[in-house]
Image (tube, rainbow, N blue to C red):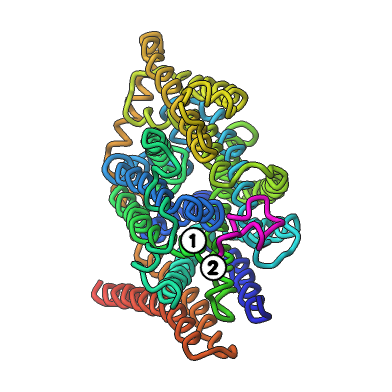
Amino acid sequence: MTIYDYIVVVFYLAFMFLLGPVYKSFSKSASDFFRGGGNMLWWVVGSSTFMSTFSAWSFTGGAAKAYETGTFFLLLFACNIVGYLFTYLFTAAKFRQMRVVTAIEAIRKRFGNTNEQVFAWLPIFANLVLGGIYLYTISIFMYGVFGVNITLLIVLLGSVVCLMTLFGGSWAATAGDFVQMLIVLSITLVMVFLTLSHPQIGGLAGLLEKIPEAHTNWSLFDRPWVVVFFAVTLLINQLVQNNSMTTTGGAKYVFVKNGRDARRSTMISIFGYLILSPIWMIPALAATYFHPNLAVEFPMLNNPNEAAYVAMAQTLLPTGLLGLLVCAIFAATLTTINTFLNVSSGAFVRNFYIRIVDRHASESKQILIGRIFILVNGVLMMSMAVYFQGLKSTPLFDLLLIAAASIGIPSTIPLFFGIFVKKTPAWSAWSTMLVGFVLAIMLRVVLTNDFISALFSPQEAFTGQELSDLNIAITTGALFVVCTAWYFASMLFYKWETEGYERQVEAFFVEMNTPLRMEDEHGKTEENDRRQYDVLSKLCLIYGGFVMLLNLIPNSWESRIYISLCGTLILSVGVVLRSIGARIRRKKITSLQYS
């Protein structure tokens, strides 16, 4: 990287940090701080939801998987699309119509006070682990670019995202994601264009000729039945976790104005995975041609293939745009981590602090406690990332999927079926989770390569890829079957529940299925909408203007064209948003004149 690339990175970090103070004035109440007052624009929330799942892991662990197995990696994105289609059809509106500030409050309404406390702490620890993984993955990527000590990178990046969320709350964590999505989109499109237009590639047809045969023929590294087993369990995992009360979708949809907006926001994720995912993986596929031996180029990385995107960026991008790619990776990860921090903070304050410690805490005190919690949780997340640095034998792709299954499946099964099935006792939720956690621990001990080989007794020994896929599939499948069986078996004991609990559950289902009238909760929203458009337009114009200034860097005219394309995309969006904000302002003035 050149001095110009470093300037781009420094500007981005400063830009992200300042989002906190910019959005600080938006938080007048605890509801504002933890969920944007339930009054955010649907496409902003949709962008944030998509960015929360499209993290730096996609550019490191995901890129490594695409580098090693090619189109096989698209299975994950295909399963996400199915999961979000289910959300659009069945659950998005329900999440918003639960009428809560945090997702954990919905658990109290559905399963009672005990489950509220159990599940209030669960996402805190789960997000701590997953946040540590994501922070570690971005540091791995930055190490490949900068060669700086990974621990130092963890502390630096963790501090930036922690302080941004601490000041701006859900507004900074969510609204800022939209600008970051534009950064990821613009640089990804440039990377793809440079890859396919490279003389040694010769377009998409040329790329398909040059990549290894196994990248399009999965049976060369996995037996067909292993692929099917892995795909089915992965689909189950993504479907359940994308439609649970406490995961990203369920936690994000409380930010929008009503059930209709919740459904509309899911379309951002669906189209994002449908369009961006296949495009995104093209540079990782081409890395097999340009960089066939990443272990030689990045010998200090635990898993050198996780530097596939870095290697391609260094090969293709002109001065300045490499720094912009680094910013895109920052953007992809920081959105995920600040979501974890914000959700955990909301659970701690709204479902523990004001329920157990101080029932009369003022709105300002709730915000203060939330900020203190974000600071402490951020430090713990950094410590967790440093811990993962020592797990040298576990690829990031496998690490994330195993963690998602072991933690996610037990905790989300009751919170998924609980939206549809009424007649389960209150203890069905926490007991299902407990059974799942015990099984997950047992599986981590039992599921060795030798055990898997002995279980299936193949005539030809399993490859390392097959053993890895089977480990993930068995973990997911076993947890799903056992947790689901336990949850539904608890229905046998529903008849012993109290009448008070039955009325509570019935009221929850009635409320969840009753459309929300905007005027009842928000009143007139034009002024808030205009303010959101104005702030977002200014952010886009500032960042787009900075990207255009990169044309002053000594570069070829061709490189300047690519820089201009990135800047123009961001600037154009800023102009459109500013125009919409002005139109809302004129409409309000006109209505006042005639009133």
Q: To which quarter of the image does residue 282 belong?
A: bottom left
Mark 2 in CB contact with mark 1 (< 8 angstroms): yes
Q: Amino acid at mark 2?
A: Met
Q: Cα distance, mark 2 to mark 1? A: 7 Å
Does the segment drawn in magenta span residue 303? yes
Query: Measuring 62% from the left and 75% from the top, which residue is drawn there?
Result: 11
Query: Measuring 35% from the left and 48% from the top, which residue is drawn there?
Result: 78
Q: Nearer the viewer, residue 212 or 134?
A: 212
Residue bearing mark 1: 284
Helix, strand or loop at disc 2?
helix
Left or right of 40: which side holds 55?
A: right
**In which quadrant will I find the C terminus?**
bottom left
What percent of the width, then of the height, locates residue 242?
41, 42
What percent of the width, then of the height, locates residue 323?
59, 74
476 is higher (above) or lower (below) than 151:
above
Q: Nearer the viewer, residue 332 or 106?
A: 332
Residue bearing mark 2: 312
What percent of the width, then of the height, locates residue 137?
61, 53
Does the segment drawn in magenta span residue 315? no
Q: Which residues are magenta?
A: 291-307
Q: To which quarter of the image does residue 193 belong?
A: bottom left
- Label disc, if present, on residue 514 of the rendered structure: none
**In which quadrant will I find the N terminus?**
bottom right
Left or right of 594: which side holds 478?
A: right
